[in-house]
Image (cartoon, helix red, strand yellow):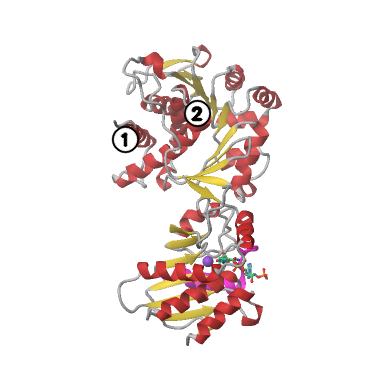
Amino acid sequence: MQALYLTSSLRKLEQQYASEPLMERAGHAVATLARTLLAEGHNRILVVAGPGNNGGDAFVAARYLKAWWHEVTVVFAGQRASLPPDAAHAYDGWLECGGEVLNTWPETGAWQLAIDGLFGIGLQRPLTGEMADLVARINALSLPMLAIDIPSGLAADTGVILGTAVRATHTITFLGRKPGLYTLDGPDHAGKVHVDLLGLPPLPEADGTLLDAPFTLPARRRLNSHKGSNGSAGVIGGAASMTGAALLTARAALLLGAGRVYAGLLDPAAPALDADYPELMLRDADQLPTVHALAVGPGMGRSPQAYAALQQALANPAPLVLDADALNLLAADADLQHRLAERASGSVVITPHPGEAATLLATDTASLQADRIASALALAERYQAIALLKGCGTVVATPDGRWWINASGNPGLGSAGMGDTLTGIIVALAAQSLPLLESTLLAAYLHGAAADAAVAHGQGPVGLTATEVMLSARRLLNRWLSTAHAG
Ligand SMILES: NC(=O)C1=CN([C@@H]2O[C@H](COP(=O)(O)OP(=O)(O)OC[C@H]3O[C@@H](n4cnc5c(N)ncnc54)[C@H](OP(=O)(O)O)[C@@H]3O)[C@@H](O)[C@H]2O)[C@@H](O)CC1
Ligand SMILES: [K+]
């Protein structure tokens, strides 16, 4: 797992070490990485430098690459007189070594690599006009593209595209990883992320954490154990024509290790048996026995029966996962919110997609997505629950202000049933006595990693199914457990 830093923290670090030659080190790191991305020998490289210190890094990189006998073209989108001091110094260094600066886009180039030093963490407002045109030209190159610090146009804290943004194949990021590289549009624009601390010690306190490994694993199963030792999971949902959602959750709970799984279905005409998984115990929604962990919402609808089932579930002290229509019901009803508030803080996880999350916060999806971390934190605070905000770079936040971004997963997860599966994984882990936050963090990473493994086996991203993801998740969890518990 890796630390994530907001711009405000990185700025403090920059100030603290202002006397260190950070730009020189940054430019050298860019040039060094560029060299490893290029074939041996003489190469042609395009460097685009912007009006701030990100441009300064680009001038330093250009100087090193020229010294290493590459042919470097520098396009500068700014004025020498307006550059900040370090960047002006880097500009002069480039001229002094015989480099040229172009103020317009060169007609021909035949470059092997482009370096994007247009904007870094100082970008504050959307790119328009000439700057937006420049990004369009950069993106039209179809070249390996190395972004300095962050792809120009991407907001470092949020992953929001400010007008337009460079699509890099690699990003070398300085002093610490920025959350914007990992959520919303960040992953599409950053490519492979490389980190360089510029010779400084890492910041002592991270703002957030990147989930790029299993957060934790359930304890080793004792030989002397039985189904009662592995916990019971319950799922409430499955109104008429939506029983499939609840069954997917229940199946995922079974496959991820709950000792017993009960599905309480709201559809009075629901089948008495899941023919593919007769291990599941199907009941009426109001006939569930006491369970160790409960999931409410998949395919539940918003009927009075669904409302009553949710009301009852909130009174149940077992760890609770609320998903789908349980969230819509909750958002619309003060009594349900009051019942949730009466529970122990953090004994519930809510797992909204951005639309549901917007409803829960009484806002619109665009505003919610404009800062996914802040939105997840607001959800956690507002509902005193663990909040898992789905989407590219799922964000998990706690009521006490901690947050994580999940790094696993791929576009194959964009199909029906994937959310039901995630809910089933969380409830399975919680039923097996893993604390709810740990269950949520492990499930988020496992769900994405399972999809990644399935894609690696040719099962997606096109046409990947929720069933394939849960089977893949079972394989992966067992592999992690056998590695962790070996010897
Ligand atoms: N400081 C350090 O110690 C170190 C910093 N380092 C490097 O510096 C980078 C941060 O540099 P930075 O703060 O100068 O900001 P940067 O991203 O270059 O952009 C600012 C410029 O862009 C302009 N501008 C903004 N928005 C605009 C728009 N929409 N359209 C047009 N213009 C716009 C803005 O103009 P203004 O808003 O003032 O009008 C200003 O001129 C960081 O990412 C890393 O690469 C490393 O060397 C390590 C040490
Ligand atoms: K950049």
Q: Residues within 10 Å of mark 1 (few under 14, many from 20)?
A: few
Image quadrant of residue 389? Answer: top right
| Horizontal relation, residue 123 to residue 72: left or right | right
Element type at mark 1: helix
Does residue 35 appear anywhere in the picture? yes
Residue type for callout 2: Pro
Image quadrant of residue 252? Answer: top left
Viewer-side residue, 43 vs 166:
43
Q: Residues within 10 Å of mark 2 (few under 14, many from 20)?
A: many
| Residue drawn at point x = 59 percent, y = 47 percent | 207
Viewer-side residue, 182 vs 244:
182
Residue 233 x, y percent position in the rendering: 45, 20
92, above or below 398, in the image = below
| Residue drawn at point x = 50 percent, y = 59 percent | 197
Q: Which residue is mark 2?
A: 298
Return the mark for residue 483. Answer: 1
| Residue drawn at point x = 33 percent, y = 30 percent | 485
82, above or below 152, in the image = below
| Residue drawn at point x = 58 percent, y = 53 percent | 158
175, above or below 28, in the image = above
The magenta stretch spans which residues? 122-141
Marks 2 and 1, the one that precedes in the sequence: 2
Viewer-side residue, 165 vs 281:
165
33, above or below 81, in the image = above
Does residue 358 appear anywhere in the picture? no
Residue 69 x, y percent position in the rendering: 37, 81
Magenta stretch holds residue 391: no
Magenta stretch holds residue 140: yes
Residue 369 x, y percent position in the rendering: 59, 48
Residue 487 x, y percent position in the rendering: 29, 31
Q: Nearer the viewer, mark 2 or mark 1?
A: 1
Image quadrant of residue 208? Answer: top right
